[in-house]
Amino acid sequence: MSAEKYMIDDYELVVGLEVHVELATATKLFSASANRFGDEPNTHIDPVTLGLPGALPVLNRQAVELAMRIGLALNCTVQPCTFHRKNYFYPDMPKAYQISQYDQPLNIDGWLELPGGKRIGVERAHLEEDTGKSTHIGGTGGRIHGSDYSLIDFNRAGVPLVEIVGRPDIASPDEARQYVTELRQILVAVGASDAKMEEGSMRCDANVSVRKAGQPLGTRCEIKNVNSVRSLGRAIEYEARRQIALIDSGERVRQETRHWDETDGRTHTLRTKEDADDYRYFLEPDPAGPRDVVDRSGEGRLADVAA
Amino acid sequence: MAKVARLARLDVTPTEIDRLTTQLAGMLEHFADIDALDLGAVTPMTQPYPLVNVMRDDVVVTGLDRDEVLAAAPAAEDGRFRVPPIVGLDS
Amino acid sequence: MAIPSTASSIAESVRRGERTATEILESYLANIERREKDIHAFNLVTTEQARAMAAKVDADVAAGRDPGALAGVPIALKDNMCTRGVPTTCSSRILEGWKPPYDATVVTRLAAAGAVFVGKTNLDEFAMGSSTENSAFGVTHNPHDTSRVAGGSSGGSAAAVAAEFAAASLGSDTGGSIRQPAALCGVVGVKPTYGTVSRYGLVAFASSLDQIGPFTTDVRDSALLLEVMSGHDPLDSTSIPQPPLSLMSSLDQDVKGLRIGRITDLPGGSDPEVEARVAEAFAALAAAGATIVDVELPSMKYGLTAYYLIAPAEASSNLARYDGVRYGLRVESSDTNSMYGATRAAGFGDEVKRRIMLGTYALSAGYYDAYYGKALKVRRLISDDFARAYQKADVIITPTSPIVAFPVGAKVDDPLSMYLCDVFTIPTNLAGHPAMSVPFGTGADGLPVGVQVLAPTLGEAAMFRVAAQLERSAPGGAR
């Protein structure tokens, strides 16, 4: 096991990864439309998927099962949980809120072991619904910036996701790549997902900050739009160096979300944290979260508790 | 109040903001009656009839007809919902 | 033989072949033709669809097929219940002309039972209000005195039954929106236990408070409608996993030995005539063999506050979907964010905007604990108070509304005064219990007074038992 800490100049890297995984269920998280990739737009829609007036969510048992398998495979504590509404406006969000998990998620406090033996902590792995997909017409390279209008396809809206939040224990681009590779193998092995980054069934965001040894944590930036394992390594390396250059020249790193551009090999400002919406989380009054007892000695079967 | 209106995506004129502020302030003052209660030991009640583990089987059910749905849409193109440029929003 | 005028008698007469659904429908359509212009109960009268439904019922009867328990019964639906292909507007500009691509579960169940839908009734916009004056499409007038309101938010449905435009109608009740207009219009109105009637297809106002229920001319009809509509729905996760309610047998039982609760710390300020009618109701029940017991609900007076924090909070989230993207009104703009603000400003009326603002505020960062969080705890206190009261009493009786129908325009400038109309009905929604309003005499100016019967969760049997007795004992004679 290597005892050498990865450094760039005198700086250590502190990296936490957030991975969103689309579950391999037949239907969506809260409705019975098919969970399928690549079909004609808006052919897997129903009142719940579209957020029609009067629609109500009904939880998919298999999604909970697969999410529990992920939690157990990552050595998490699987616990009774609840769903919350995360309120914000975006055209691919049909209800203008996302049903997600907040303070009582399904899986908490696990870890993933890298090939060299180092353990990367997993803070939580919770269930939430995916958004629709927007296509931007008229701008350059299909980006929002400069577009004339956008088209929304809701086939993906409502697909079950597990969001796996890793602790900031990753210290190098290599470790990040190993983490994601290892995670993918686990997801496929337990049958939870096909976890294909190219198809979007596994998506990875990286939180990156730098510091000199012994110093407190630096300001972190979130990197989005990383579409492959290789890009992940490149993006982290680029971002770390960008931050180091700023600090070395006497400036401070601004906390913000940045977009990774594969073609020019750089990250660009997407938005600053001050613009962040207040999500006004509150308990989802419609579906009742799974509160059953999970048998941890076995494989984690869903044991129904009499209502 | 202007910030609340922005969160709720409601365009309000300055006159409306003033009126709403006055009305809501009056209501909140009335609602302050609950401040007199000792609620420390009380658990919140979110569900009138407590149900747990309400789930369904993972079986596909035919959904809505796309044409019927898009016919009711304000703007549609190419089998999809059309919206003006998406700027100034978090994703 | 006179045209039968209750849902039960209509269904029986049609099933027996004594009357056709078509002739019954035509008599109600004639009533609508005559008086609807003075009352404005409907956003839309669905004449052609109604005639087609009646014709189908008649064809079923002629062919010897079972036409259903509600065969030929003309029913009106509050315009916040999805009816496929028929505009469902919630009396809001933001959904003006919107045709849902699916039916609400209650709509499907009533249609399967042979009901004939005569139209979509007017309401306060998105069910927010107590007078139907918040409708974007005009106010509904009280059939007993058209200078007065019909109550709200289900004013149109209450008025439709009172004016004999329909033999029964459906409303929704979040804080009293069935019971209060029932009282003001002199008809029976029931809010069943939360979870007994599916909310799938009911446009959501406050998810943990909304319930669908019937308006009818008599107690028997409400029992019949609930038997048809209630029962588990897999499409509604809050639907209680139970079969449909069974209520008919309660209607002929007497009230001997039942304990009727009288709330000693009930908030005051009701019309003296209303209080007099309620006192007579207690006396009638005692004379019929019931025992009156005193109960206390010390938290009841905080119900209004809890409600006006919880309901707008849930509503602010439920109404966020009206954004001009997928359906309804869109105000064209240069970008999506502007489109949201402009569309919602143009599409929503004042009361809706007010409640969205209040709800957004109550949930926002830094204020959650002070407002929404506290309100949820007050809700628990009220629920606990009821639980204690129902150890001593089988049902509780109160006025439904503190006042009789008020003149149109009298309360529009004072939202708080409007909110006070629901002081006796709100606690029931917070607790999730059933309650119903039964007409019981008149008050000032000869206007109807309603007496409210409250029962614990799934206590509909006792509730209907007492309601049936009240109906038998009502001043002016029972129907």
Image (cartoon, coloured by chain):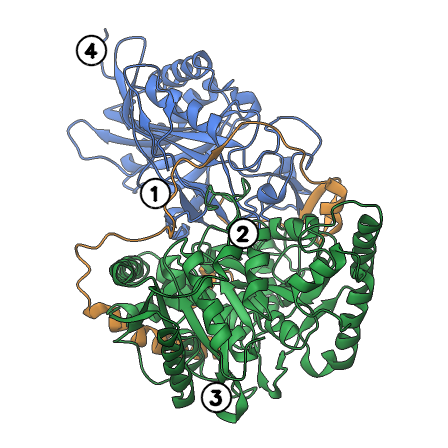
Chain colours: A blue, B orange, C green
Q: Report the side of C255 relative to C142 (left or right).
A: left
Q: Nearer the viewer, residue C444 or C46?
A: C444
User: Which residue is label 4 attached to?
Assistant: A3
Q: Name the residue type under label 1.
A: Gln
Give yes or no for contact between labels 3 and 1 (Cβ–Cβ under 8 Å). Answer: no
- The residue where tag 1 is placed is A255
Relative to the observer, which residue lies in front, A59 or A254? A59
Label 3 or label 4, whichever lies nearer to me, is 3
Dot 3 and dot 4 within a common chain: no
Q: Which residue is mark 3?
A: C443
Q: Chain of mark 3?
A: C
Give the CA distance from mark 2 to mark 3.
35 Å
Kindly identify the residue that appears in the image at 44 percent across and 55 percent down: C193
Q: Residue at x 63, y 76 (%)?
A: C162
Q: Is residue C234 left or right of residue A10?
A: right
Q: Which residue is mark 2?
A: C199
* Residue drawn at the location 42% of the way across and 14% of the way down: A181
Mark 4 chain = A
In the image, is C16 to the left or to the right of A156?
right
| Residues at marks 1 and 4 on the same chain | yes
Q: Badge 4, how many Cα within 10 Å: few under 14, some, many 20+?
A: few
Is disc 1 surrounded by few (<14), some (14 to 19) or many (20+) residues within 10 Å?
A: some
Q: Quadrant of the C terminus of chain C?
A: bottom right
Sequence-first tag of 1 and 4: 4
CA gap between label 1 and label 4 equals 31 Å
Residue A186: where, in percent of width, then height?
40, 14
Tag 4: residue type?
Ala
Mark pair 3, 1: CA separation: 66 Å
C412 in relation to C198, above or below: below
Q: Position of residue C102 (x, y in %)?
A: 68, 48
